[in-house]
Amino acid sequence: MTIINSIVNWLNYKRIYEIDLFKKYPIDTQREVLFELIDQARDTQFGQQYNFRSMMTESDFKSRIPVRTYEDYSPYINRLLKGERNVLWPGETKWFAKSSGTTNDKSKFIPVSKHSLEDVHYRGFKDVLALYLKNNPDSRVLYGKSLTLGGSHRVNSFNNNSFYGDLSAILIENTPFWSDFIRIPPAEVALIEEFEEKVVKIIEQARDENVTSLAGVPSWNLVLLQRVLEATGKTNILDVWPNLEVFIHGGIKFDPYREQYRQIIPSDQMKYMETYNASEGFFAIQDNPESSDMLLMLDYGIYYEFIPMDRFHEENPPALSLDEIELEKNYAMVISTNGGLWRYLIGDTVKFTRRNPYKIRITGRTKHYINAFGEELIVDNAEEALLMACTRTQATIREYTAGPVFMSQNQKGAHQWIIEFEQHPNDLEHFISVLDGTLQTLNSDYEAKRHKSITLERPQITVAPEGLFYEWMKQRGKIGGQNKIPRLANDRIYLDQLLELEKNKFSK
């Protein structure tokens, strides 16, 4: 074990003990988090509105405060943006993480308090390192730099007291100066708004550094790594950074990109570690390299509830506490945080894979699904089926999206998939058959609608030209690490935009 790792592991010893403690006592930990949040916010305007001082039980909390979306919180957040204090959380909220989301173009401004910066976001990143070194005690990751590809919006000022930007930009603005010694690129490059310009600068500054880790969203990091190879003339990334050992990723599911990373980083020793973090908080970390599920982090100042997706569209669906959840059931996640979000519907869906400790995997978004014909197709189904189709036909997918083909007088319903392949399938018809068959195996509702093609016909695949999705995101102003390509939609808006772009720009 190296000296540096020994020192860091000694410093991390207490934290590893605390993680083991909440794994052992998860329900007690969450109850303690909730009442600490209530106590801290009891004299805020929100706390007085809902009489936090008299809340004695979790039932009191749930019965008084409704589950809210961002739109419901907008009036409160607008007051915070103008500098009003003690609205949702004690004191002044100075920072706001700007997020356009993935379901519409409206900007969201998520309040980021000092508590959530320190006790959630920074603590999450520290825990990633602590857990990685615990699992890899001989790692030399600390002997080099971490190449981090953040968002595309620098911090801007609403007024003299409040600022907004991508979460990554806010974190960079608040990290100490010495962080540039362990991270590449430096802050002035990381905060460049134009993605293409930023990539060029990153390559200039990072190509000759000892990069030992990568961090970011798989899709955009892949773009960066491909540009690195083009700029250096190397055949794989290890020829550029021979000591690279881990990619810490999040934001979107990694499975569709796994094969492309294997090709560009051809080493069985390369490690991949998933995290689940967002503007609203840092939620889970892959603590076991042998399993793809993630440990739900229970002591960050976030209280969790879960709405069963099979009851999500009811007028007042139940929001379950941790001790009420069932394994392998799809839930919409609701959070209350030390950033001042109370019973906030974040928009993600998860499944629990185990208890004691509680582990989850992300299954999609509450608004990212196809249910035009009662098939209830979610992103998790789509990813698994595409992976199987790729495996059977030696294909690799770069990007994709899917939506419905609506019934007409002479047309039954179907799903249309626009797929940009990195490696095309050796038999497209077989690819479609495997995709369709796997979806039927995974999803009984889809299977019922496909039975004898009574309601749904076989999927339709449109093969996208190279660069279509990148150009589409660019035209929408959504280039960069904070932006995600929508995978499923219950309408044809994305499909029609892509098809129109292909017709006008790629078919000439």
Image: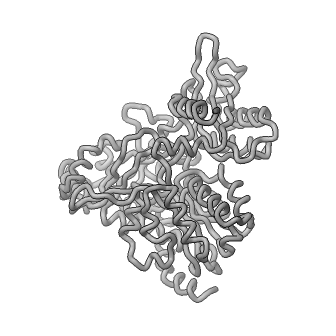
For the point 28% across and 44% down, the residue is 74
Residue 216, percent from left and from top: 54, 60
Position of the N terminus, as image quadrant, is bottom right
For the point 35% across and 53% down, the residue is 336
Q: Quadrant of residue 259?
A: bottom right
In this rendering, the answer to whether 148 lies above or below 104 is: below
In the foreground, 200 or 47:
200
Residue 181, percent from left and from top: 48, 79
- In this view, which residue lies farthest toward the front? 508
For the point 71% across and 66% down, the residue is 234
Residue 480, percent from left and from top: 49, 53
- In this view, which residue lies farthest toward the top? 409
Whether residue 11 is visible to the viewer of this picture, yes or no, is yes
In this rendering, the answer to whether 428 lies above or below 140 is: above
- In this view, which residue lies farthest toward the bottom? 3
Would you say 89 lies left or right of 267 here? left
The colour scheme used to paint the residues is one colour
Residue 138, percent from left and from top: 65, 80
Q: Quadrant of residue 168?
A: bottom left
In the foreground, 285 or 262:
262
- In this view, which residue lies farthest toward the right? 426
Position of the C terminus, as image quadrant, is top right
In the foreground, 45 or 359:
45
Would you say 265 lies left or right of 176 here? right
* Number of marks in picture: 0
Q: Quadrant of residue 91?
A: bottom left
Would you say 481 lies left or right of 32 here? right
In this rendering, the answer to whether 429 lies above or below 173 is: above
Whether residue 35 is visible to the viewer of this picture, yes or no, is no
